[in-house]
Amino acid sequence: MAGVRAWVAGARPRTLPAAVSPVLVGSGAAAAADGFELAPALLALVVAVSLQVGANYANDYSDGVRGTDAGRVGPLRLVGSGVATPTAVRTAAVVTLGIGAVAGIGLASISSWWLVAVGAVALAAAWTYTGGPSPYGYRALGEVAVFVFFGLVAVLGTTYAQLDTVTAVSVAGAIGIGALACAILVANNLRDIPTDAASGKRTLAVVLGDRPTRALYVTLVAVATGSLIWLAYLAPQSLLGAVFLLPAARGVDAVVRGASGRALVTVLHDAGLAELVYAVGVTAGLVLHG
């Protein structure tokens, strides 16, 4: 039986900035329009974190039973390592996603009921990333889904739940957050190209190959930088988010220099830290602007 530490590791805590950051920026955009509301923000945070952790467990389960986690470098895989049974990990995924669904219904009840439909699509995307008969994560669509759900949907949805509208600030922030969330996945998949290719998992990194994937990582950081410039035009205090360039530059340097294997685990950490720092800095600036 897996212990608490194993379950925490299996939840892949280094990916949690991808869940927390969009809620921060979406709430910052609401604050910049003098419309911040605590209850919707907290419910949006529960939804985002539950979807992220649930998707991680679902990914662990699906990849584990398919055998694509065998020999993988990086964070602990519960099923692939034999630490937990497939049934236990699948149950953890269902329970965690269920918590997100309940929080999502609560969020819709105090904002707009059409958000239930958005949440249902997000839940389906979390499960079918590597689950089901035709997982889109095996067809080079993972980065697209991350940009949509952990960038556009998460940021704009958080803002909408508080303002009943979206703003140019929230759109600019959503693009930056989406790009950095994608960078986390690109770093992960760049590291896993050898094992994914051998197991038949066609991630975008496998399809593109090593060098183009490294170029994609750099491009995503550049897109986030461009979105910050746009934000600074709309709300100058948003430039506080420029601190994200410190961990981002460290990760870019490692990627450009050809880091591979376990060295890319550090890049994965830097990518998550860059997104979180971007979100905290931008949010602080938007609050000051409001």
Image: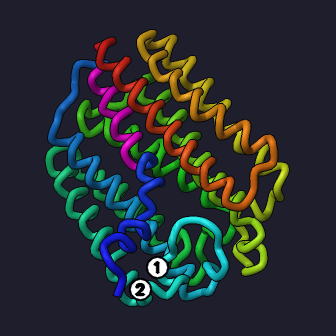
Side of 189 relative to 162 (left or right): right
Neighbourhood count class around disc 2 (C-alpha, 10 Å): few under 14, some 14–19, many 20 upward: some
**x, y (%) of residue 34?**
23, 19
Residue occupying image coordinates x 36% and y 45%: 20
Query: Which quadrant of the view contains residue 85?
Result: bottom left
**x, y (%) of residue 236?**
45, 9
Its colouring scheme is: rainbow
Residue 204 in sight from this viewpoint: no
Residue occupying image coordinates x 47% and y 54%: 15
Side of 161 relative to 55 (left or right): left
Q: Give, as a single range, the part of the protein colored magenta.
A: 19-31
Indicate the secondary structure of the residue bearing disc 1: loop
Looking at this view, is 148 or 4 the one in front? 4
Location of residue 47 with respect to 33 vertically, above or below: below
Query: Which quadrant of the view contains residue 197?
Result: bottom right
**x, y (%) of residue 27?**
30, 32
Neighbourhood count class around disc 1 (C-alpha, 10 Å): few under 14, some 14–19, many 20 upward: many
Q: How many marks?
A: 2
Discs 1, 2 touching: Cβ within 8 Å: yes
Location of residue 67 with respect to 254 vertically, above or below: below
> Majority secondary structure of the magenta segment?
helix
Indicate the secondary structure of the residue bearing disc 2: loop
Residue occupying image coordinates x 49% and y 88%: 82
Which image quarter holds the C terminus?
Answer: top left
Residue 22 among magenta residues:
yes
Query: Which quadrant of the view contains residue 123?
Result: bottom left
Reading the image, the residue beneath label 2 is 84
Residue 233 among magenta residues:
no
**x, y (%) of residue 278?**
47, 30
Side of 9 relative to 47 (left or right): right
